Image: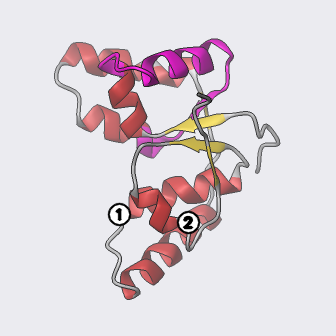
Amino acid sequence: METKDSDKVLVDTSVWIEFFRRRHPYYEVLSDLIDEDRVVCTGVILAELLQGAKSIKEIDTLKEFLFVFDFLPESEKIWERAGVASFRLQRAGKSIGLSDCYIAAITKANNVKLFTLDRHFDVIKKEITFERYKIKR
C-alpha cells in the first residue's frame, strides 16, 4: 500500500544522530518537521538507532518512536526491489548495504522524501529513483 503524502519525510539514521547531538542545522530542521507532523519512520531505521544506543535510557526514548511517528507499510515487493538493487550495485563494484537499498526502496514505494546525510544514497539512485529532502537555506 502506498501513501499519497509526498510532503512526508523519512528521516535516515544519519540525520537522527545529528538531531540527538543537537547539531545545527539538523536539529532545527528536524524539530520543525516533527512539529509539522511530517516525519515517518520504518523498522530498519528504528533498529539502526536502537543498535547504536548508549544506554537503556536512550533505548527507552527511541522506543517512543513507535507511538510518535507513523511507520511506512512494508511489503515483499519492497524487499525484492532492495535485494535486486543491492545485487546490481554489487555487480557494478559498489558495496552498498542492503539496509540502505531497502530505505531507498521504501521511500520510493511510499512516495515520501528521504532526509539523509549518507552519500551511499547518491549511488543507490542509479538503481532506485527517489526524492531527497533538501534543507531550505
In x, y percent, where is residue 28?
Answer: 49, 15
Residue 37 magenta-highlighted = yes
Number of other residues with Cα within 10 Å of mark 1, as a class: few under 14, some 14 to 19, many 20 or more = some
The answer to whether residue 110 is above or below residue 77 is above
Q: Of discs 1 and 2, which sits in the foreground? A: 2
- Residue 134 in percent (x, y) is at 59, 39
Residue beneath disc 1:
97
Query: Is the residue 119 above or below the residue 63 in the image?
Result: below
Q: From the image, which quarter does the C terminus lie in?
A: top right
- Which residue is found at the position 52% from the left and 22% from the top? 30
Residue 1: x, y in percent? 76, 51
Residue under the image location 43 percent in, 78 percent down: 89
Image location of residue 58, percent across then percent down: 27, 18
Looking at the image, which residue sits at the far left? 54
Q: Residue furthest bottom?
A: 91
Please tell me how crowded label 2 is: few (under 14), some (14-19), or many (20+) other residues with Cα within 10 Å: some
Q: Viewer-proximal residue, 69 or 132?
A: 132
Residue type at mark 1: give it.
Gly
Return the mark for residue 67: none
Q: Please name the residue shown 63% across and 41% down the image.
A: 72
Q: Is residue 6 left or right of residue 134?
A: right
The range drawn in magenta is: 20-45
Q: Which residue is mark 2?
A: 125
